[in-house]
Image (spheres, rainbow, N blue to C red):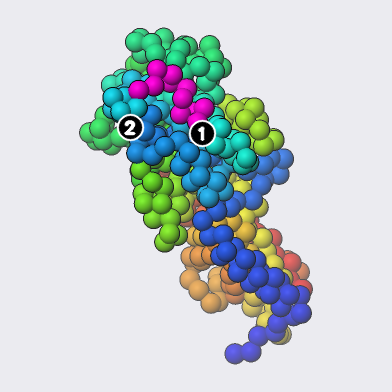
Amino acid sequence: MKKLVTLSSFIFLLSSFLFAHDHHKHERVISFPNIPGYLTLKCDLHQHTVFSDGDVWPTIRVEEAVKDGLDAISLTEHLEYQPHKSDIPHPDRNRAYKLAFDAAKDTNLIVINGSEITRKMPPGHSNAIFLNDANKMLIQDSVEVFREAKRQGAFTFWNHPNWLGQSKTGVATLTDLHKLLLKEKLLDGIEVVNDLTYSDEALQIALDYNLTIMGTSDIHGLIDWQYDVPKGGHRPITLVFAKERTAASLKEALFEKRTVVYYNDLLIGRNEFLIPLIRQSLSVGPSSYQGKTSVMTVTIKNSSDMDYLLENKSEYLLHNTADVVTVKANDVTTIEVKVLQNIPSISLKFSVLNAVNAPKKHPEIILTVLPQ
């Protein structure tokens, strides 16, 4: 079957090929577009080094982050759990941050001072980031330590609420102590993704209690080994939509809940930010009817590092595939749409199957196509 290929279509496909080819030179770097009004900052705000129970020196965390193209990190060492203190005594709980901050001076990486409040359930483990002095967080009372974090203007979030070490069912569950923290506004966010796990229940808690949706690596070993980066894997991160590329703007964005989590080729977040991110990632290229037929060839370009899995929800059926389409990362995908009549434009509605805006729910987007 012959197809009509316009000059503009050829140029679009050629430029897209070159775009994708160039991307493969930097496969490790995680890339997502900015959204209208905001910069998309890539952040991993829960990591460990030998200054608590991690396996590497803080400078390694900086080098990994730079290689991954991250914008910000926080080394959230356990305040109470110090298994290496005999080998690496350090009375200053800010030491890991200071080493990482100095190592990042010649880079564009933002390093944020943070600590992990490490308690039995309840309340379990939580991170406090944007601290002024982590030493002042060495407080025995499990509520007063959160109050101290707030006195320092910190952003706090509940870590791995689905962790089997503290929840045998793997279900994130609010306790009375968590409700007290929420009532006093001492808890600002919650991890829906931690390391290799995702929690629907944590996402629902975030939605029910208006908490910031977070995703982190909680890395203790090497990023490359844990997430198989040499074979195309990636660490989980929080995409933060900030007005500027500064620590202050990042902090403001976290408090305003402008986040989407990127985990295992899945996006998790509120529609307010999730849909703009998807729309900026996907664009419709030159499209045209095939000769004198009413079948339209539509090209969709993906300018992000994530494949998008789209389910056709529009009134039109597709001619070259079933109702589920994979739009490859940094590539162009072509679909054929049976319009049934030659009209000047069509709207294609898709459910984004590898994006989640609530447990078992997916956002929908509409792509407008103007055939040439």
Q: Residue beneath label 1, please?
A: 100
Question: Vertical placement of 48 versus 69: above or below?
Answer: above
Q: From where the camera sits, is residue 112 visible?
A: yes
Hey, what amino acid is under mark 2?
Answer: Asp
Q: Nearer the viewer, residue 198 or 14?
A: 14
Within-10-Å neighbours for mark 2: few <14, some 14–19, many 20+: some
Question: What residue is at 60 percent from the left and 69 percent from the top?
Answer: 21
Q: Write the start and end of the magenta stretch as one range.
A: 89-99
Question: What residue is at 53 percent from the left and 77 percent from the top?
Answer: 320
Question: What residue is at 55 percent from the left and 46 percent from the top?
Answer: 66
Q: Residue beneath label 2, please?
A: 53
First in sequence, mark 1 or 2: give its number.
Answer: 2
In terms of image quadrants, where is residue 82?
A: top left
Residue 93 part of the magenta segment: yes
Quadrant of the drawing holding the C terminus: bottom right
Tell me the element at label 2.
loop
Q: Position of residue 160 (x, y in %)?
A: 36, 33
Q: Position of residue 182 (x, y in %)?
A: 45, 18
